[in-house]
Amino acid sequence: MEQKKERLIFIDLMRAFAVLQMVQGHTINSLLSPEYRTIESGFYYIWHTIRGFTAPIFMFTSGLAFTYLLRSANLPFMQNPRVIKGLKRVGLLLFLAYILRFPISQVFDLSSINYNQWLVFYTVDALHIIGMGLFFVIILSFIGEKFKIKDNITFTIAALFFFLLAPSVLTSNAFDKFPPIIRGFFTDRYGSLFPLFPWAGYVMAGAILGSFIANNKEFVKSRVFSYNLVFYGSLFVSLSAIISQLSIHGLIEDKYWVEIIKLVLLRTGVVISLYGIATIIEKKMTYCPKIVKLLGANTLFIYVAHLMVLYGFMFFPGFDRIYGNQLNSTTSLISAIAMLALMIGMVKANTKLKYVIKR
C-alpha cells in the first residue's frame, strides 16, 4: 500500500511561481510589438532575463516533485504504484505535447497539411522534454535498484551526460538525416525550442534533489538544509560568472561549449538558490494560501489551458493570431495580468467541478 506523503509547501511555492512566470512570459512574448523589444529598455531587459529561468525552474521542479513522490513510496520498483502512475503521466505529457502542435483545423483532412506544418508538429517543446525526463527517471530508478546504485550517482551521471554533451550534440550534423520526429529531440536547427541536450539535464538535476528530500525528510526541515541550497546555488552562479570573466578577458577561448556550460551553471544555480529561499519562506509561514496549493497541483492544466487561449484551438483562433506582436508594453502587461486572472479562475472552477463530480 502506498504511504501517505507529507506535503511540502516549498514545492508548491516553486510550482506556483514557475507556472505564473510561464503564463505571463508566453503572453507578453506573444503580444508585444517588436519595437518594444530592446535591451535599452530597462523593464524589457529585466523581464527578458527573468523569463530565461522559467523553463529550467519548470523542468527542475517536475523532476524533483516526481522523484520525491516515487521515492516517498519506499517500495521496491515493481511494487511501487508511482511507477505505473509515472508511465501514464509520461504518455499523457507526450500526447498533449503533440496534440497542442497538431494543425487541428486539418484533423479530418491530413492530405491538406503541408510540409512546413508537419515540421512544426515535429518540433520539441517543454512538455516533450518533461515527459522524456520523467521516463528517464523511471528507467534509471529501475537500473539503480537492479545494480544497487544510489540515486545520487545515477541521476548525477545522467544530468552531467545531458549537460556536458550538449555542445557536441547541438553542433553535430549527424542527426540531420534522422526522421523529423526524432531529430527534433537532438537539434534546435529545425525549430525545436527545448532539445534533450541540455534541457533534460534540468529534469535529472531536479530528480537528484527530489530523491534527497524523500530520504532525508527530517534534515529538510532544518535551516541548515535551506542555507546549503542557497550556498550551493550561489556557488554555481559564481562559477558561471568566473567562466564569463575568463572568456571576456581572453583567458579561455570563447567557444559555443563555454556559453552552454556557463548558462547551465547560471540557470541551475539560480533554481537551487530559489529553492533555498522557498524553504526559508516555508519555515516562516504559519499558513499557506489555498491558491498556492491549487496552482501547484494544477500546473499541467494551466499549461495546456493558457496555450489554447493564447495560440488557439479547434473553434477559437487564439489571441496570438488576432493581436500577435501588435500591442505596446502597457497593453501587453495588462493582457498578461488578465491571462493570469483567467487561469486562476479556471483552476478554481475546475477544482469545484471535480468536487461536484466526486460527490
Image (cartoon, rainbow, N blue to C red):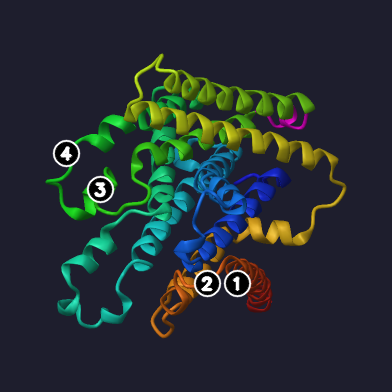
Mark nearer the N terminus (2 vs 4): 4
Distance, label 3 to label 4, CA atoms, is: 10 Å
Circle 2: element type: loop
The location of residue 274, given as percent across then percent down, is 66, 38
Q: Is residue 50 in view from this perspective?
A: yes
Of tags 1 and 3, the one toward the viewer is: 1
Q: Which residue is mark 1?
A: 331
Q: Amino acid at mark 4?
A: Asn
Q: Which residue is mark 2?
A: 327
Instruction: Please identify the quadrant where the C terminus is shown.
Output: bottom right
Q: Amino acid at mark 1?
A: Thr
Q: Which residues are magenta?
A: 216-222
The verdict on residue 131 being magenta is no
Question: 211 or 298: nearer the eye?
Answer: 298
Circle 4: element type: loop
Q: Can you say whether 324 is above or below 146 in the image? A: below
Distance, label 2 to label 4, CA atoms, is: 39 Å
90 left or right of 216 in image: left
Q: Residue at x 46, y 33 (%)?
A: 263
Residue farthest toward the left in the current orientation of the protein? 177
The location of residue 255, given as percent across then percent down, is 32, 26
Circle 3: element type: loop
Distance, label 4 to label 1, CA atoms, is: 42 Å
Mark nearer the N terminus (3 vs 4): 4
Q: Amino acid at mark 3?
A: Arg
Task: Mark 2: give few (<14), some (14-19) or many (20+) Cα within 10 Å.
Answer: some
Q: Which residue is mark 3?
A: 189
Q: Which residue is mark 4?
A: 173
Of tags 2 and 4, the one toward the viewer is: 2
